[in-house]
Image (cartoon, grey):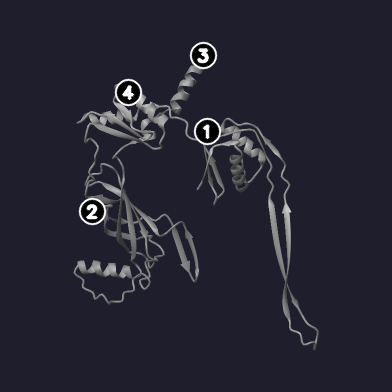
Amino acid sequence: MKQIFAVLLMTLVSFAAYADRIKDVASIQGVRDNQLSGYGLVVGLDGSGDQTTQTPFTVQSVISMLSQMGVNMPQTTIMQLKNVAAVMVTASLPPFSKPGQTIDITASSIGNSKSLRGGTLLMTPLKGADGQVYAMAQGNLLVGGVGAASAGSSVQVNHLNVGRVPGGATVERAVPSVLGQGNYIHLELNTSDFTTASRIVNVINDQIAPDIAVAQDGRMIEVRAPQGSGLVAFISRVENLEISQAQGVARVIINARTGSVVMNQAVTLDPCAVAHGNLTVVINTDTTVSQPNAFSGGRTAKTDKSTIDVKSDKGGLVELPKGVSLSEVVKALNAIGATPQDLLAILQAMKSSGALHAELEVI
């Protein structure tokens, strides 16, 4: 009896561990971040700013800023600035942000400055896609790197031309939210899947109220929601409902530049035989000098002698058994003994032969 109870307990724990919440696979329509950007100046650099002869916009920005502060300088003034750098400031405005709250910002050099370390970002307006100012940024930059140079030699650790200011921008304008307008909220699945959408609808209708959720397609689910003060509690309850997510499409991701191969748990393999050998072509060129005999009237000439060597490694025929789980597929592919670069060609050939049941996606 104790053994049966232990098995049941392990089963329940395993089920709870692998259950997904609705908030893990879907989001509320209209609840999203908004991107902000702006142009600003970083001052106080230790001689590592923009070389102003090559970045005239930095000088123009400084002259414009000084003129607003009552310092009049002719536009033709030649300024050799070394402690100023022009930067682009970016930030992500979270949903429901209110005026007075602070957000993190990132400043990236757009000139030829050597480092932003130790600099201070001057007040920079951050605008949205509509051209409105939503936040004001200012503060001391944190650069996660260090560098030094002397007499033509230099050493650098990490990147020096990008810095962050935690809480460096203050929200000045709130983004209007569509949440709470109307009698419905809409859930958007992170990945379009009809099975997952159907399961979410069934869970909501079974555990909250019947016939309040309807799947419009494989990504969008419409849910009838209460209005007023009960909306937030209702959304919280919906987001924390647990569902058993449908198994995704079998897919193998191949990065041809790095040789990386990633496959999900839905990949299966039929019995097949694979033989793979490497073909190596080596071309050597030796340069010799042809020297004529004395008083022959000939001229010294350079001659090239090339040799071509083609080698083909032996590739034994390897029989791969059927694999119905990811561990079995990995074990079968490891039996080939191929390098990641060789595996790219092998997987494509296995897909063409019909032995590999998965979609190949090259990135």
Q: Nearer the viewer, residue 36 or 202?
A: 202
Which amino acid, mark 2?
Gln
Q: Which residue is mark 3?
A: 4
* Percent x, y of residue 134: 24, 51
Q: Which callout, 3 or 1, points to the residue nearer the camera?
A: 1
Do the residues under discs 3 and 4 have CB atoms within 8 angstroms? Answer: no
Assign a secondary structure to mark 2: loop
Position of residue 316 relative to residue 306, above or below, is above
* Percent x, y of residue 196: 41, 30
Q: Nearer the viewer, residue 107 or 22?
A: 22
Q: Nearer the viewer, residue 82 or 174?
A: 174
Which amino acid, mark 4?
Asn
337 left or right of 361 in image: right
Position of residue 93 relative to residue 206, above or below, is below
Position of residue 59 relative to residue 208, above or below, is below
Residue 205, disc:
4
- Give the crowd class for mark 2: few <14, some 14-19, many >=20 residues within 10 Å: few
Question: What separation in Å lies between label 2 and label 3 (alpha carbons)?
Answer: 65 Å
Question: What separation in Å lies between label 3 and label 1 (alpha carbons)?
Answer: 31 Å
Question: What separation in Å lies between label 3 and label 4 (alpha carbons)?
Answer: 33 Å
Q: Which residue is mark 2?
A: 132
Assign a secondary structure to mark 3: helix
Q: Which callout, 3 or 4, points to the residue nearer the camera?
A: 4
Q: In the displayed image of the protein, which residue is found farthest to the top?
A: 1
* Percent x, y of residue 32: 31, 42
